Amino acid sequence: MGPPEMKLPLFNALAREVDIRGVFRYCNDYSAALALVASGRVNVKRLVTHHFDITETQKAFETARDGLGGAIKVMIHVQKRNTNNPVKC
C-alpha cells in the first residue's frame, strides 16, 4: 500500500493513452488461492527461481533487484537445505 495521497504524471499518461485503474488485490483472494495450491492444480514451486545460502545474502538481493537470470522469487535459506528446500539453482 502506498501513501494516501500521491502525485501522478497525468500528462504522460494522457499522451501515452494509459488507463489508470485502482485495484485492491487482497480482497477475497486468499481462500481461493490456497485451495488451488493445496489441490495441486497450481504449481507454485516453479516461481522460486533462485536459492541462496544465508552467507550469499548480498548476491541474493542483487539478483532480486536486477532480475538477473530471470529472477521471479529469490529465497534466502537460513538453515541447511533438506527435503523442504533441497536444490540450489
Image (cartoon, rainbow, N blue to C red):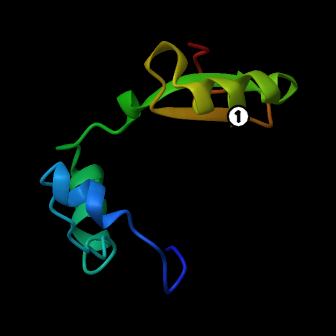
Question: Residue tagged by mark 1?
Answer: 76
- Can residue 81 be seen by looking at this rendering? no
Residue at the image position 80 percent from the left and 30 percent from the top: 57
Q: For mark 1, give the secondary structure.
A: strand
| Amino acid of disc 1 | Ile
In this view, the residue in front, 74 or 67, is 67
Query: Residue 67: image x %, image y %?
Result: 51, 25
Number of numbered tags placed on the structure image: 1
Residue at the image position 18 percent from the left and 52 percent from the top: 15
- Can residue 49 be seen by looking at this rendering? yes
In this view, the residue in front, 37 or 22, is 22
Q: Is residue 9 above or below residue 65?
A: below
Query: Residue 6: image x %, image y %?
Result: 48, 77
Dividing the picture into quarters, in which one does residue 70 lie? Answer: top left
Quarter occupied by the C terminus? top right
Left or right, residue 45 beside residue 86: left
Badge 1 local density, few (<14 within 10 Å), some, or many (20+)?
some
Query: Residue 49: image x %, image y %?
Result: 47, 24
